[in-house]
């Protein structure tokens, strides 16, 4: 009888410990699912932004930019803002591009850092351009929508 009571007590402790561990892993699993969903949404927004830029659809492209958006390109003397970026669309013709290796890293509640590689070609002020670059972007949720706040282009060899 004593052995049976000991076995039951051990079984109850094991079940309790297992339930505690499942409770701990549930929030982590939920966060991973939320991050995976956000990564897909943001990848879609990045792809749409490149498409809008190629088509020179300023209205659609501007819609994803935060009001205080800034970008820093490989050859710039400093960051440029939203209005300048939209004006640059007239000078830059993207003939083709390929986006790959997307990674999303959460940066607190309602913020994420997206990185990806791109190869593009076209013209800038009628001069041919061909580039391989790594992009880093900071996205933030504003008014229930993801907006691009900061973008960094780094040329790759």
Image: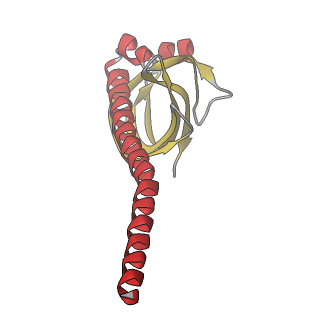
Rendering colour mode: secondary structure
Residue 93 against residue 119 in the figure, above or below: above
In-image side of 100 versus 112 (left or right): left
Is 124 or 72 nearer to us in this picture? 72
Task: Please state, as top left, top right, bottom left or bottom right, where the N terminus lies in the image.
Answer: bottom left
Image spot of residue 157 (x, y percent)? 51, 52
Residue 94 seen: no
Residue 46 seen: yes
Image point (36%, 29%), residue name: 45
**Residue closest to the far front:** 1
In-image side of 136 versus 93 (left or right): right
Image point (43%, 54%), residue name: 23
Residue 20 against residue 122 in the figure, above or below: below
**Residue closest to the far right:** 77
Image spot of residue 114 (x, y percent)? 47, 40
Is 87 or 15 nearer to us in this picture? 15
Image point (46%, 56%), residue name: 24
Is 44 or 27 nearer to us in this picture? 27
Image point (42%, 83%), residue name: 6
- Asked which quadrant contains residue 31, the reply is top left
Is 3 or 136 nearer to us in this picture? 3
Residue 77 against residue 2 in the figure, above or below: above
- Asked which quadrant contains residue 79, the reply is top right
- Asked which quadrant contains residue 83, the reply is top right
């Amino acid at each position: 009888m004593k052995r049976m009571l000991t076995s039951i007590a051990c079984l109850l402790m094991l079940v309790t410990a297992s339930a505690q561990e499942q409770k701990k892993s549930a929030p982590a699993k939920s966060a991973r699912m939320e991050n995976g969903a956000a990564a897909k949404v943001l990848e879609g927004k990045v792809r749409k932004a490149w498409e809008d830029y190629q088509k020179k659809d300023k209205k659609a492209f501007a819609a994803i930019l935060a009001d205080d958006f800034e970008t820093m390109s490989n050859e710039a003397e400093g960051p440029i803002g939203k209005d300048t970026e939209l004006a640059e669309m007239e000078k830059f013709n993207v003939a083709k591009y390929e986006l790959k290796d997307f990674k999303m890293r959460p940066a607190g509640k309602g913020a994420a850092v997206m990185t990806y590689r791109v190869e593009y070609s076209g013209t800038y002020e009628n001069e041919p351009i061909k580039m391989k670059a790594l992009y880093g972007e900071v996205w933030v949720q504003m008014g229930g929508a993801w907006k691009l706040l900061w973008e960094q282009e780094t040329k790759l060899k």
